[in-house]
Image (cartoon, coloured by chain):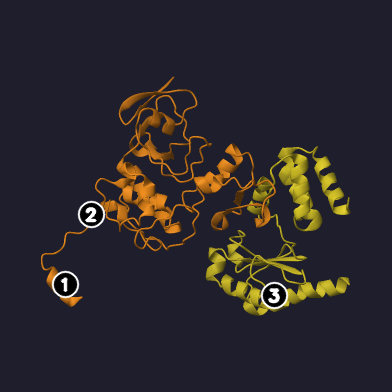
Chain colours: A yellow, B orange
Amino acid sequence: MNVETQKVKIFMQKHDNQKRALISILQDIQAEFNYLPKEALQDVAKTLEIPLIHIIGVATFYRSFSLEPRGKHQATVCTGTACHVRGGPKILDEFERKLGVEAGHTTEDRQFTLETVACLGCCAIGPVVVVDNEYFAHTSIREVGSILKKYRKKEKDNE
Amino acid sequence: MIKFIMNGLEVQAEEGWSILETAKFYGLEIPTLCYNEGLSPYGGCRLCLVEIGEGPRAKLVSSCTYPAEEGLFVRTDTNRVIKARRMMIELMLSVAPGSKVIQDLASKFGVKQMRFEVRNEECILCGLCVRICAEQMDAHAIGFQNRGHKKKISTPFDIRSDVCRHCGACMYICPACQLRCQGPDADTAVCNACLTMDPTCLDTYDELQCWMYDAGKCGTCVQEKPEKPNSEDNEKTA
């Protein structure tokens, strides 16, 4: 038994292997591995006696779960109505160009996951970009590079 | 016994019946697509819409999921209901115009136009295959994934499922992906080849007869257009 399966087992035991705790268990797995590994989901299905397809249904329904490994930093570009009219899509294009991935995907070096959101509720400061819970207000295409550089730099400093 | 009014008649329903089941018991026809007697109701196709209540408070509900209640006032064929049903058929048609079942419904309910972009997806997400797999076959091999416009039906991780026994029940029950409409332009538009039938083969003939022999072309069910008297002139121009 590898470390991964053991961890998943502990998460399930924390909730007494209850079917109704499925989402909590998935959240724990997501927090631990930064995505939902296939083997982990199969273990959960077996132990909780839930058909695997139901778990997949839940895992693909909620945005906080991901079946693919997520990047270290999460970049979210708002494309809601207010941000849209102020140039949100152009900023998203710039992010896609700079990172080389489409929205919803992770860069090859697993540093950034690019996502879109419909509205963040702070339309007054749009177009909004959020990276790891840090909000960037009134962003322009020019700023995209510096935002990414800031997080890349943090990475280097930590090393 | 639950007593309520349906289309002006006083009807009695047993405990646990839906409006649709009561209507069927009394022989009132309500069109359905995602409903199957052996499966749990889903309320996805919205074809079985009926109007309940009176006056400005009347609202549309799906009769397959709405339980019969004491003192309900149900109307199954008001203008509003028919309009809503036509819209639903039109929407489903734009998703899967190749489906014989949906083209037949369009012909039957007089849907002659389709104002939406054709998507040719071969799946209208009616959930019949998911339910038959789970409830009748007890396999739970396929299910809904994602949500919104990305919603789809598939096996876990889109690979061959361990629990699938290849029984084929999902394909048997599918209204969209198996039986193809063979009429003219079926893939691009409203076919309506069956619309001119007299009597309509939808009720009279076995549907096999139609798609085996090129519906609309064999002539058994479609009235040909009366030839114009000056047919010679037409030939010359052609």
Q: Is residue B116 above or below residue B50?
A: below
Q: Secondary structure at mark 3?
A: helix
- Residue at 23% x, 54% y: name it: B223
Q: Are marks 2 and 3 on the same chain?
A: no
Q: Nearer the viewer, residue A1 or A138?
A: A1
In the picture of the structure, the residue carrying the numbered disc 3 is A99
Residue A50, image x, y percentages: 70, 41
Residue B33 position, x and y percent, is 44, 44
Mark pair 2, 3: CA separation: 61 Å
Is residue B58 among what the camera can see?
Answer: no
What residue occupies the far top of the structure in this picture? B1
Quickly name the residue at label 2.
B223
Residue assigned mark 1: B234
Amino acid on which the number 2 mark rests in the picture:
Gln
User: Which residue sits furthest bottom?
Assistant: A142
Along the viewing direction, whichever of B68 and B32 lies nearer the viewer: B32
Are there few (<14), some (14-19), or many (20+) residues within 10 Å of tag 1? few
Subunit bearing disc 2: B
